[in-house]
Image: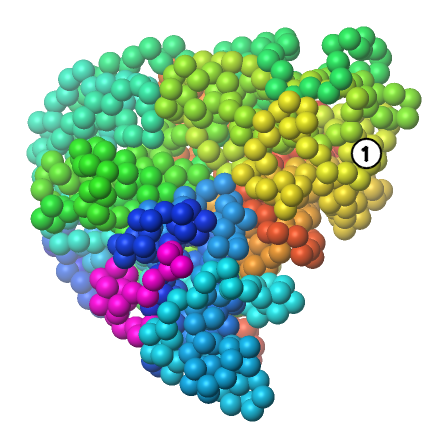
Amino acid sequence: MKNIQNVSRRQFLKLSGITASSFVLGISLPLSKAVANEKSTDFHELNFFVSIKENGDISLICHRSEMGQGIRTSVPQIIADELEANWSKVSVVQAKADKKYGSQGTAGSASIRNHFTTIRKMGAIARDMLEQAAANIWQVDKSQVSAKNHYVHHNATGQKISFGELAKVAAKLPLPDIKTIKLKSNNDFSLIGKDVKLVDLDNIVAGKAQFAQDIQLPDMLIATIQRPPVVGGKVKSFDATAAKKVKGVVDVIQLKDRNIPVDVLPLSGIAVLATNTWAAIEGRKKLSIKWEHGDKKSHNSEEYKQALIKKVNTPGEKVRAIGDVYSHKFDSDNTVEATYTVPYLHHAPMETPASTAMFKEDKCIIWAGTQNPQWAQGMVARDLGLAKDEMDKVELNVTLMGGAFGRKSKGDFIVESVELAKATGRPVKVIWSREDDVKHGFYHSSSANYFKAQLDDNGKVDNLITRNAYPPIGWLWDQNVKTPSDSQLSLGFADIPFELNNLSCEKHSVESYVRPGWVRSVACINNGFALGSFVDELAVKAKKTPRQMWLNLIGNDRQIDPTKEGFKYSNYNLDPKEHPLDTKRIKHLINLISDKANVEEELPNNQGWGISFLRSFGTFVAAASKVEVKNNKVKVLEMHTAVDCGIVVTPDRVKAQMEGAMIFGLSIALMGEISVKEGQVEQGNFHDYPVARMNQIPKLFVHLVKSDAPPGGIGEPGVPPVAPSITNAIYHASKIRIRDLPVNKVLQV
Amino acid sequence: MISLTVNNKIIKLDIEPQMPLLYALRDELKLTGTKFGCGAGLCGACTVHLDGQAIRSCVTPVSAVDGKKITTIEGLSNNSEHHIQIAWKEFKVPQCGYCQSGQMMSASALLSQNNNPTEQDIETFMQGNICRCGTYKRIKKAIQSAAQNMGDKSE
């Protein structure tokens, strides 16, 4: 057992900041890699921790970042279940950035779907040691004892010893061979699948939860930054005289110039630093800056969209093909052809990006809300010119995030705080204004998706062409990247789950101008919108119900393997044996949503139902929306999602994510649009980048499918089918077909 | 010098009179439960009570609250005992939690002036508070439940 070590109390305290513990277990993640890695036997590479105090209190480390999905409950809940711990005695310690934890990148709805078994092993190993300790005390074989609810029981006599009492003995035991560790059977789950007390709920309700913006340090300065309006722009000259006269302003500093490729680094600009936020804001207003905009100032999003539409209406580069669709002569009477567009979209988390940094001796200490602590730590280290083995000189403390949705995967704002702390020699908190957030984001790419298919007399399809064009995220690192990667194309595009004899999925290459980024469900937003809209258009043409059209297209029960058709399908980095693209599960959801929402009911003329479906991040989700269109105004009356995510860890949080996803999807469908003119984002705050408010929210219903399948993701998969369910409903209510989002270009919302 | 009462404590502040109350609370008094969301009175994250009424502290200069009584989330109750806070826990309203101080301050102000709000009343009053996580359904339920519980108690 090379990857597990007992850690002394002192060493543990040093690493975790926990005040007392007598039994500490450190485990390297990922287990598979760590076993093969000799270095992991070194104490300093230990990372995942279970600790038990003599009074029975258990402290578990959460190594993933909390942004509202409830992961600070779910990860410890999984460990505690295998450990047989009593949830009321568990406290959670947030991990700092450290590669010894394995992946901390909290993105792609990955925390549970990719790490479920590994997280369970953390608890199971600790449980095994406690059982061994009790067996030794009773002088029986370990098979004669069993851990349950914070005690180890002697099966024959009914005697029991508490975890707290066993902790000391367990800590002295040799570590078990991981191969002998048995995970519980699903039937024996004590916490997984149950709603436990949420870890951060009390603090949030008391107003005591600490977010990145809430960090307070002695002698700290607040910084606000005027960034180049155009990506790749630079400061030509600036005058800070007036800014420096504002009471409370301490310094005005030009950030270092950054070049293209922009990476996820800062954009440069002029920072105003003050003793309070208001002074910094007032000082910034008085800056006089001349900008060199650079060549991205030629970008206009409306023209760009038209160019994307043109592209997808011509053949592109095939990424997946079945048969030969181009030898088919499409019969125009029975063919549906459509192009769908989604504008640039922004995350707009309620908490704008913020980070606090300070230097102490030779160490840089940071507090930030980040989805990817190690990535940010590495960026800071590189920016400071540290060597790879000097990562311990960058201490990154992870705070709660007031929303993130992908925005806080990028460490630009963290590097800004470090640059300014270094320049001033004082602790610096960088706070983004809402305008900074909206104007300098990493946007969901403006996109065009094209579909063409021919229907036969039975409402079936045999020939289908689909294409897309949008600026790829890979451009951040290499401006020669002009097409989406295969894993990007696996997001609801080339994994189209239809039974067809002739299919062609094609991509196009495009230039990029603004920073593209992952926004909740990423390319599934546009691919899901196009797919869901097109199926509805086929249904209308074929005079079938949308349910029947989906079932026709999906065809027989089978597991689809797009790699057989030449596509490098990434399947969200999931093992296709455990997470197959299973048409039976899709059909079940199409039927479930149609029945539960009663979408085939008779409705008044100005009302309509719409449905859609997308499997994403290993989870199957169908959505249904009912709308009313009256006097050129749309009102969403009711929304449903049906979700099959395999094993559920925290049911209430799954429901909460689905509720939130419906509202996120509603915002995208009805109102979401970032537009760019001469390279500059036109929106700036919630008045011109509106998001859903309470008065726009209909009744919401979530239908959770019971399943023993391995868990899929939850944070993102609820989003993609929502927007098309709404626009399809609009069509059925009004005969107005929305192919170009958002809806508010055509109808009041 | 500005003098005001914050959570029942008299506070004297030597700050710029045009500084928004939000920054006086957060930067000067270190009361960070009140949040910055937009800086323009558009999102409600910064909602506090001014003499019992919900106001947006990000657009309220401290000079406007000189001599007045301010309540923030930290002062809404002892030990989160306000009916609104109890209901927020019961319905597990928060996701990320960032906007929830403002949501609870708005909701408690609503109930203090209307102890039996209709669904429409709730929507009208609460539409100034944005929740990007989308907890609106639970916010509404929690307000209805809190109203019910307050009514039961007063009967």
Label 1 neighbourhood size at 10 Å, few (<14), some (14-19), many (20+)? some
Q: Is residue A3 magenta?
A: yes
For residue A485, side relative to residue A395 (left or right): right
Rendered location of residue B40, percent (x, y):
35, 40
Residue labelled with disc 1: A555
Q: Which sits in the foreground, B105 or A21? A: A21
Quadrant in which the C terminus of chain A is drawn: top right
Rendered location of residue A459, percent (x, y):
86, 26
Q: Tell me the residue at 53%/30% (across/down).
A: A487
Q: Is residue A569 magenta?
A: no
A2 up-or-down from A726: above or below: below
Q: Tell me the residue at 55%/89% (across/down).
A: A158
Q: Which sits in the foreground, A494 or A637? A: A494
Residue B54 placement: quadrant: bottom left
For residue A67, side relative to residue B153 (left or right): left
Rendered location of residue A401, percent (x, y):
38, 49
Q: Tell me the residue at 78%/25% (across/down).
A: A500
Amino acid at circle 1: Gly
For residue A127, side relative to residue A322 (left or right): left
Magenta residues? A1-23
A506 up-or-down from A123: above or below: above
